[in-house]
Amino acid sequence: METIVAIVGLWVIVVAGVVIPAYINYEAPPEILFTDTESIELTEFSFSQTDITVAPGTDLTFELLNVGGSQHNFGFSDDNVTERIKPGNTDSFHAGVLTKDRTFFCGIPGHRDNGMELTVHVSGS
């Protein structure tokens, strides 16, 4: 019986060690207060807009049109970008609910370095 109590006690300690830290570090998803869609044209080394301001809690989507002569993409990290958008084609990018400023860019090598950045400012952040 003591062995069973010891095993159950150890199991409770292990589960608590996993569950409690996960609960403490849990962040609820941001609340959607507004929705916005911004149209952006992509061309050689520039976006049609370089600064946008939205309210905190805005669920933002970009409608993208490549008006340039080369392929571009759009995103906010190397792992979170659109597929390459060929000249004349369109795509969309869901940025999510914004609660702080975020910079978006073309991730094709050399494009961001030459100016393909767009900053979304969240008013009040």
Image: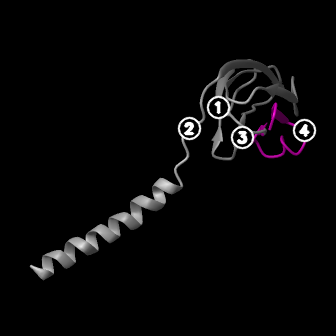
Residue at the extreme right: 114
Residue at the extreme left: 1
- From the top left corner, tell me how far across and down residue 27 is, in percent: 55, 46
Residue 43: tell me if it is visible. Answer: no
Labels 4 and 1 touching (C-beta < 8 A) = no
Q: Mark 3 points at which residue?
A: 76
2 or 1: mark nearer the eye:
2
The CA span between labels 4 and 1 is 25 Å
| In the image, residue 65 above or below residue 124 | above
4 or 1: mark nearer the eye:
1
For the point 20% across and 75% down, the residue is 7
Disc 2 marks a residue whose amino acid type is Pro
Give the number of the disc on residue 97.
Answer: 1
Q: Is 99 contained in the magenta span?
A: no
Q: Name the residue under label 2.
A: 29
Res. 90 image quadrant: top right
1 or 3: mark nearer the eye:
1
The CA span between labels 2 and 1 is 9 Å
Q: Mark 1 or mark 2, which is nearer the start of the sequence?
A: 2
Q: In this view, does 7 lie to the left or right of 75?
A: left
Q: Mark 4 points at which residue?
A: 115
Disc 4 marks a residue whose amino acid type is Gly
Disc 1 marks a residue whose amino acid type is Val
Disc 3 marks a residue whose amino acid type is Phe
Residue at the extreme bottom: 2
Q: Mark 1 or mark 4, which is nearer the start of the sequence?
A: 1
Q: In this view, does 29 lie to the left or right of 39?
A: left
